[in-house]
Amino acid sequence: MALQDLTPQLRTRLSRMERAVGWFVLLATALLVFGFAYYVYNTAERKGWFKTKAPYFTFADRATGLKVGDPVNLMGFDVGQITRIDAQPPWDYQHAVYVEFEIKSPYYGYLWTEGSRAKVATADLLGKRVLEVTKGTGGYPTYVFNPLRTLPVAEVQRLPNLLHWELAQEIFAPDSTNLIARPLGPLTNLTAIAAAGYTNIIIMNTNDVQKSMTGIWNDKEGQYDPYTKTNDPYWLLSDETPAVTERLEKLVGDVEKALPNILGLTNQLTMVLSNTVHLTSNLDFVAVSIRPAVSNLGAATANLDHPGALGEWLLPTNVNRQLETTLVNANSTITNVNTNLAALVENVGRSLDNLAGITSNLNQQVQTNTNLVGGLSQTVIHYDEFVQGLKHHWLLRSAFKNTNTNLPPNAPLQPLRSPKEKNQQ
């Protein structure tokens, strides 16, 4: 049915419906476009599409477990991704695989010329490997974001606001490896730099920080070179660990080398088991042999279940009776000895008492008669004089005569001779 055949009311409703459908389609399209734009923006934020990325490269022995797009880790964070993996030319005998990657902002600030390295480490047991970079410990930043300028030393001295400029290269003393000035240092020693023979130096403006890299460190020249898209990335030295498959192959090789020793050990174990079986058979024979001795021992110990049984077994009845008689005789002997000893001690005590009485009487007589000792002395002297007088009496002189022994004859005297006569003899 044609539109002209409709009534005005139906035509009005139809036009309203068409406008509603049009607005719905327009709104749905706008929502779809907004959702797609939000998804793209969120993905770009998550993947760092809007962030500045600093390129780096390293070398590996093999590309096993690595692929383009794999994340790069720093201190456990995903800070970038691998952008290129390629083999080195055949004539490059020092390196095998070229691995290029990029680090997004702000994590490239952790990578310095000293301490930062690229590690190719094992990620799982299926041969997957991951690229990890380490935090720098010293040196200089690998990239700078300040404009670089190469100017003569005289012109540098005339720059306004000299404190906003820093050195961008290493300055060495002439004919020496001693550093006069380091990069990122203030320009306060321009006189020493000029005296070292430098006419032009590289400086950078610290007051102007740009969003993209302006300089890359040159390890060979010891300076920052201007950075462009055509520059080679910064080279990070690599530390590579073998893949899990290689380590498993090595483990299998070690196991194969150890198998002969293991088989020898099993043979020794078999021999030990056979010896053990033979020993147990001999033990069975020994057990049968000592069964009568065990029976006798059981019979002997069966009588030890009452008090005194062990003593009666070790000491028979007759020995016990003789031992008891001996002990009784010894007891009586000891009693008699004790009695006699007591009497002897009593007699000795009486003798000592009498001796003490005599000495006390003597002491008393000496103390009461003070002339007793003098009289005794005079008596001894008179007695000696009496004996000497008897010796000189004519009747008793022969009784006290001394007996003279034969003395040896005296040697004859030799006549005196001269020394000459003595020599002649």
Image (tube, rainbow, N blue to C red):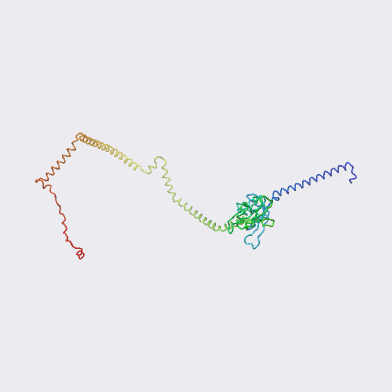
Left or right of 305: which side holds 414? Answer: left
Give the quarter of the image for residue 12.
Answer: top right
Residue lying furthest right? 5
Give the quarter of the image for residue 13.
Answer: top right
For the residue pair 410 and 146, the one nearer the viewer reads as: 146
Q: Position of residue 416 (x, y in %)?
A: 17, 61
Residue lying furthest top? 368
Left or right of 155: which side holds 424? Answer: left
Q: Position of residue 97 (x, y in %)?
A: 65, 58
Left or right of 409: which side holds 9? Answer: right
For the residue pair 209 and 194, the one nearer the viewer reads as: 194
Residue lying furthest left? 395
Q: Where is residue 114 in the image (x, y as percent from the top left)?
A: 60, 53
For the residue pair 159 and 276, the one nearer the viewer reads as: 159
Tally the marks.
0
Q: Where is residue 392 in the image (x, y as percent from the top left)?
A: 11, 46
Residue lying furthest bottom? 424
Screen quadrant of the C terminus: bottom left
